[in-house]
Image (tube, grey):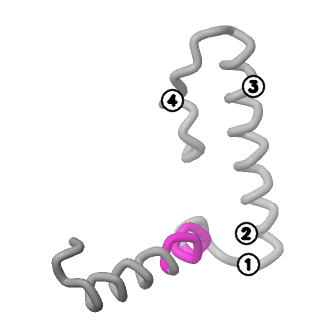
Amino acid sequence: MISGIERCQARTDRTQRNYIFFSIAAWFDQHKCRLSENITLYQQNWDVIKGSIASHIKLLLVYPSAG
């Protein structure tokens, strides 16, 4: 699963259950959006990060020593 459940660092049973529940709930929510927009998981992830990449590249072009 791509939700990141295997990287959970919660120590108590309750926090582990909450983490697992919310990870799965978020995955299902993303899945519903992918179905309604007819896009792939990779396209959905790319749409999330492309703005950050573009702004970082602009920052590097303005301040070359910032990288």
Residue 15 in percent (x, y) is at 69, 18
Residue 6: numbered disc: 4
x 47%, y 74%: residue = 52
Q: Which badge, 4 or 2, comes first in the chain's sequence?
A: 4
Q: Which residue is mark 1?
A: 38
The stretch in magenta equals: 43-50
Q: Amino acid at mark 3?
A: Asn
Q: Which residue is mark 2?
A: 34
Q: Which badge, 4 or 1, comes first in the chain's sequence?
A: 4
Q: Picture quarter containing residue 3?
A: top right
* Cβ atoms under marks 2 and 1 closer than 8 Å: yes
Gap between marks 4 and 1, in whole Å?
28 Å
Q: Amino acid at mark 1?
A: Asn
Location of residue 58 with respect to 50 vertically, above or below: below
Task: Select label 4 or label 1 by which is in front.
Answer: 4
Q: Which residue is mark 3?
A: 18
Quadrant in which the N terminus is drawn: top right
x 16%, y 77%: residue = 65
Secondary structure at badge 4 equals helix
Gap between marks 3 and 2, in whole Å?
24 Å
Secondary structure at badge 3 equals helix
Location of residue 63 with respect to 36 vertically, above or below: below
Q: Picture quarter containing residue 62?
A: bottom left
Secondary structure at badge 2 equals helix
Q: Is residue 64 left or right of residue 48?
A: left
Q: Amino acid at mark 4?
A: Glu
Q: What is the crowding at mark 3: few (fewer than 14 residues within 10 Å), some, or many (at least 20)?
A: few
* Cβ atoms under marks 3 and 1 closer than 8 Å: no
Query: Principal SS element in the magenta part?
Result: helix
